[in-house]
Amino acid sequence: MNPTTVVKVKNYLSQRAIFVVLIFLIIGIAIADPSFLAFSSLRDILHQSSTKLIIALGAAFILITGGTDLSSGRVVGLTAVISASMLQIDEYANRFFPDLPQLSPFIPALVGVGVGFLVGLVNGFVVAKLRIPPFIATLGTMIAVYGINSLYFDMEPNHSQPIGGLREDFKVWGSGYINLGGGYTIPYLVLIAIGVAFICWVIFNKTRLGKNMYAIGGNVQAAQVSGINVARNLIFIYSISGALYGIAGVLEAARTGGANNNYGFMYELDAIAACVVGGVSTAGGIGKVQGVAAGVLIFGVINYGLTFIGVSPYYQFIVKGLIIITAVAIDIRRNIAKK
């Protein structure tokens, strides 16, 4: 083979290594059990990965600026509890708000998203204006949000009881589906996640905010010199991420049909891991929506696929850990090569 062609092939594969890994994972599991290739398996993986994709997209905004967000999981938990607490059926014995009238599900959903936006706004202000490193700022927010959620969850008359009895017109967002005929269905949740991903792609690639986001992550000093208002852009970006976590929290409550104050535990690490595996650089300035989606799918395939073929969950942790370490090592080598 022509050496030039070999180089081109190597470059092509290295740039799309995440998709190659995903394909090989699917092939490997399918060899162990061919029934894994059934449409129902793909549908279930996409369904389980939908809210995680939305959270990972929120984390990607922050990572591309060169920061990190440890509060995302707890924001998901808070918004899930808030939205679920307002959408219980009248007949439920332990209603969170016994005298609350039956609201349109969009109202509690908007409240949840608004709370997520507010937490993101606080994160952005602390990072941009107080100049606290994102890791420390969002670590503090993570702890504070969990405390707020636990206090809310413990309010009378609930007293820390799991919130159940959610209305069907709300749960359908997470469990409903479109019937394509012939036994094929597509969950609403998957369509919502695709819609959110498309909006994020537009922001990343077609807006001034997206261009500024990459510029800040690539070189914050150069971004300032070029006239970018770094503080204002960071506040916008963190706020958008918070709203995305809010959307994910609302949908997670709808998907599971309930909520408690421990929802979202460790979701932030899964989101960051999916981003890193999907090619979002930990140094900032690099990342694509399609890469984040592939990273989420890889972990979805690992979780669902290895369970499907009967592999112990403990081995799944090992596989996920090795993939994360490999992805970060590749990212570091790429950054060294650039320098």
Image (spheres, grey):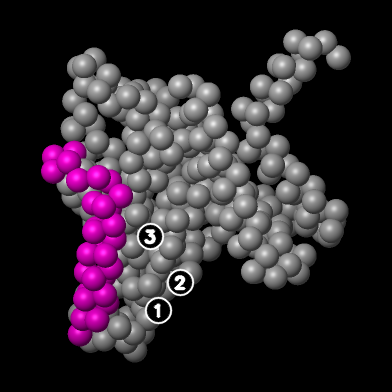
Image side of residue 88 versus residue 8, left or right? left
The residue that mark 3 highlights is: 73
Is residue 291 or residue 160 the one in the foreground?
A: 291
Where residue 186 sits in the image (x, y, percent)? 61, 52
Residue bearing mark 2: 257
Q: Residues within 10 Å of mark 2 (few under 14, many from 20)?
A: many
Q: Amino acid at mark 1?
A: Gly
Q: CA distance from mark 3 to mark 2?
A: 18 Å
Q: Amino acid at mark 3?
A: Gly
Between disc 1 and disc 3, the foreground one is 3
Q: Which residue is mark 1?
A: 164
SS under mark 2: loop
Q: Which residues are magenta?
A: 128-156
Q: Few, some or many C-alpha atoms within 10 Å of disc 1 (few <14, some 14-19, many ≥20)?
A: many
Numbered label tally? 3
Q: What amino acid type should be assigned to the residue bearing mark 2?
A: Gly
Q: CA distance from mark 1 to mark 2?
A: 7 Å
Q: Please say whether residue 155 is one of the residues in the magenta stretch.
A: yes
